[in-house]
Amino acid sequence: MAYSFGVVTLETLVGRKPGDILSSLQSTSTQSIKLCQVLDQRLRLPNNEIVIRDIIHVAVVAFASLNLNPRSRPTMKCVSQCFATELTPLSLPLSEISVQQLMSEELEALFYIGTP
């Protein structure tokens, strides 16, 4: 269930079909790809800190839900609980956050995303 959530969420964020998104992320080095480069280019990037933090939060949860190891994916209960948690501001601007960082355990911990 969480995998489906991750696919639909990622498709919404980037404005492309999930297959295109997942294959491009698996075939290239995610270290150099910035989140702002994969977000839907038809939309202007937000400049509101709260909106930026929320986009990053949703992206981190989506990538956690797409973990190749099903046992490492959060449950839908964990997903809903992490969205109910008050977040602290991030010190990184949107333009500096890479896809690799979104997929890291460090950001997952920051956003309180647990695995079963």
Image (spheres, helix red, strand yellow):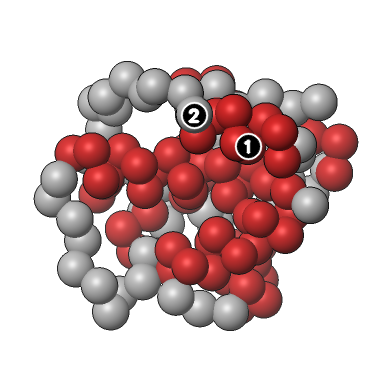
The residue depicted at 74 percent of the width and 27 percent of the height is 115
Residue depicted at 60% across the width and 48% down the height: 63
Of discs 2 and 1, which sits in the foreground? 2
Disc 1 residue crowd, few under 14, some 14–19, many 20+, Cα 10 Å: many
Residues tagged 2 and 1 counted as in contact (Cβ below 8 A): no
State which quadrant residue 96 falls in: top left
Please, what secondary structure does the residue beneath circle 2 have?
Answer: loop
Nearer-the-camera pick, 40 or 80? 80
Point 58% across, 79% down: residue: 17
Identify the amino acid type marked 1: Val
- Residue at (37%, 54%) from the top-left corner? 34
Q: Earlier in the sequence, mark 2 or mark 1?
A: 1
* Rendered location of residue 86, percent (x, y): 39, 22
Rendered position, 73 above or below 115: below
**Disc 2 residue type (three-letter):** Ala
Residue 28's image quarter?
bottom right
Judge whether 109 appears above or below 93 on screen.
above
Using residue 27 as the reference point, say whether residue 50 is left or right of it.
left
- Position of 69 compared to 35: left or right? right
Q: Position of residue 6 (x, y in %)?
A: 64, 55
- The quarter of the picture where the C terminus appears is top right
Res 45 visible: yes
Residue 112 in the image, given as x and y percentages of width and height = 55, 22
Q: How many marks?
A: 2
Can residue 108 be seen here? The reply is: no
Could you say whether the residue bearing mark 1 is in a helix, strand or loop?
helix
Q: Which mark is residue 84?
A: 2
Q: Which mark is residue 79?
A: 1
